[in-house]
Image (cartoon, rainbow, N blue to C red):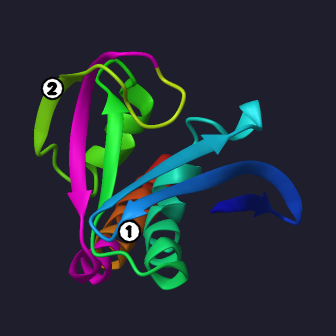
């Protein structure tokens, strides 16, 4: 399954959901607009994206498989889901070559906590923004 990401009506990226079995599903997320990378967009949209996957397909579990050296994505995911394991993968999902990957597992019951965490992150951001303006 593929979904587009739009900001103010403009295409800025896409996400893929690769489904194999109810407990074996991988997501991929790509912000294609360079000016919107590393600005918090992925962090802000994370709960909505995850809810969308579970609403769109009969998933029991979603797997995040991220290369250990992908610091941006791992930093974003660290805000929501801990690494469950790290291991070498010969044939990872998607187009990545073999290497070391972090694995994080998401279940439907995790989704409300993601929205709560997003609200906490938003409150911290707003507080920090106010202090900068003072």
Tell me, for residue 118, which label it has, or none: 1
Image quadrant in which you'd find residue 118? bottom left
Q: Is residue 31 above or below residue 87?
A: below
Mark 1 or mark 2: whose residue is earlier in sequence? 2
Specify whether residue 130 is in view: no
Question: Could you say where residue 127 lies in the image, as x and y percent from the top left?
Answer: 40, 62
Question: Could you say where residue 68 lies in the image, as x and y percent from the top left?
Answer: 28, 23
Image quadrant in which you'd find residue 10? bottom right
Q: Is residue 101 above or below residue 114?
A: above
Provide the secondary structure element on which disc 2 rests: strand
Question: Could you say where residue 70 lies in the image, as x and y percent from the top left?
Answer: 40, 24
Q: Residue at x 43, y 78 (%)?
A: 54
Provide the secondary structure element on which disc 1 rests: helix
Tell me, for residue 87, which label it has, or none: 2
Counting labels gives 2
Specify whether residue 6 is in view: yes
Question: Could you say where residue 59 lies in the image, as x and y percent from the top left?
Answer: 37, 75
Q: Residues within 10 Å of mark 2 (few under 14, many from 20)?
A: few
Q: Is residue 110 left or right of residue 30?
A: left
- The segment highlighted magenta reads 97-114
């Amino acid at each position: 399954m593929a979904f587009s990401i739009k900001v103010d009506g403009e295409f800025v990226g896409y996400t893929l959901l690769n489904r194999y079995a109810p407990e074996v599903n991988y997501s991929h997320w790509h912000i294609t607009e360079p000016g919107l990378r590393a600005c918090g967009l992925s962090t802000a949209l994370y709960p909505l994206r995850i809810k969308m996957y579970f609403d769109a397909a009969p998933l029991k579990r979603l797997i995040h498989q991220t290369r250990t050296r992908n610091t941006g994505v791992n930093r974003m995911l660290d805000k929501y889901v801990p690494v469950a394991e790290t291991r070498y993968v010969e044939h990872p999902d998607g187009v990545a070559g073999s290497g070391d990957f972090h694995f994080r597992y998401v279940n439907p019951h995790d989704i409300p906590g993601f929205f709560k965490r997003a609200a906490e992150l938003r409150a911290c951001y707003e507080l920090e923004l106010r202090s900068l303006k003072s």
